[in-house]
Image (cartoon, rainbow, N blue to C red):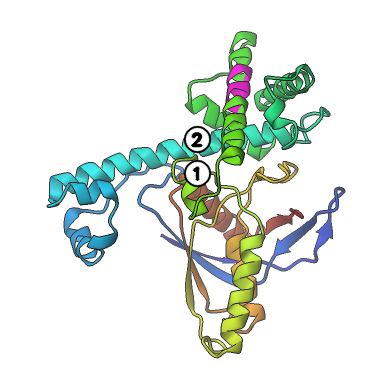
Amino acid sequence: MSFESHMHPNKPRTTANGQAAVKVASYSLVLLLLAASSRSESPAHSVFISWSEARSSLAAYSDSLPEALRSAAPLDESKWAAWVATSDREVRARLARGQEDTLSNLLRFGVTFTHEYRIDDEYLPKFGHSSLVDSFADRRATDLVRALASPHSAEGFREMRAFLEEQGYSFETAAARLRAKKVLLENLARLRDDFVKAHSEPARENRWQSFEARGISLDTNLWPDFDLDAQLRAMAQNGSLQPGSVRRIAIIGPGLDFVNKQQGYDFYPPQTIQPFAVLDSLVRLKLADSAAIEIYTLDISASVNLHIERALKNAAAGKSYVLQLPQH
């Protein structure tokens, strides 16, 4: 489905902790939410790509297929359907792990729900081995559970509570809250083990492969957008892109930042940055007409797709989208 929104400009303002908050922006923005599986206000129906739709692409890229598909050759409709269903379950499990990592980073770094010391990279390996670190980790977990249980919590906390409730946890009784606290500390221990393992292993030739089995977090920051801006500028300068020539772009995995891995800011609600950052670069470099540019977003996370859909509905109702730009 497509939505068109008109977002109104506003001057940047500075929050109490020195981060820029920008009300974005006077662009007519079209985003199409395209994903194999997405969640909406009413139950969504998941549709996987069929064998007949996929077979020509599979044949064209036969040399670079995943091992599970190569070993299943010759492929047919039933083998393809089985692989797609298995892969989807694996991706959903990794997304859940990513949400657990987001919770752990909120526990480590969050500042809005506690006054305890943050569990930075120096303290994290000591968790479970230091009574000092254990003490403020325990108090942080208590404070976080209290915030998650509050009926007046912020949007990001409500989403984290909903995630835990989907996993079978509750905040209705003292015993249930104690159980939720226990899983927060267990997830922190797992994150500690992942951290220690990652820093003890020798560097891999392709370091990106080290993430192939880890949780998929939705967090994002500005650094990729700075790189995209530099690449777009270079393409404009060498003539690869002509003024006004960009009419349609796709952003794969725009992300949804609530509490990032570096500093764990949690003073702002969940937000997506990249669609606006790329749009800003294209218009500023005069590569796109703000009245005609179309942006397509594609994400494997239903949370990201739903967030963008809500932002567009709010924009159609005249509500601006506020971006917080923390310094990482």
Residue 43 in view: no
> Observer-nearest residue: 75 or 219?
75
x, y percent for residue 128: 67, 20
Q: Amino acid at mark 1?
A: Ile
- First reached walking from the N terminus: tag 1 or tag 2: 2
Q: Residues within 10 Å of mark 2 (few under 14, many from 20)?
A: some
Up the image or down, 96 lies above or below 231; here it is above
Quarter assignment of residue 144:
top right
Measured as percent of width and height from the top left, residue 290 is found at 59, 78
Quadrant including the N terminus: bottom left
Residue 312 visible in the shown view: yes
- Foreground: 153 or 62? 62
**Residue 162 vertical placement versus 131 (above, below):** below
What mark, if any, has residue 216 been given in the picture? 1
**Does the magenta portion include 182?**
yes
Q: Is residue 177 left or right of residue 30?
A: right
Say if mark 1 contacts mark 2, CB within 8 Å.
Answer: yes
The image shows residue 254 at horizontal and vertical percentages of: 54, 57
Say left or right for 54 vs 131. Answer: left
Q: Nearer the viewer, residue 240 or 171?
A: 240
Q: How far is disc 1 from disc 2 in space, using C-alphas?
A: 7 Å
| Magenta stretch contains residue 153 | no
The type of residue carrying mark 2 is Arg
The picture quadrant where one finds residue 126 is top right
Q: Which residues are magenta?
A: 181-187
Q: Which residue is mark 2?
A: 97
Instruction: Determine the secondary structure under disc 1.
Output: loop
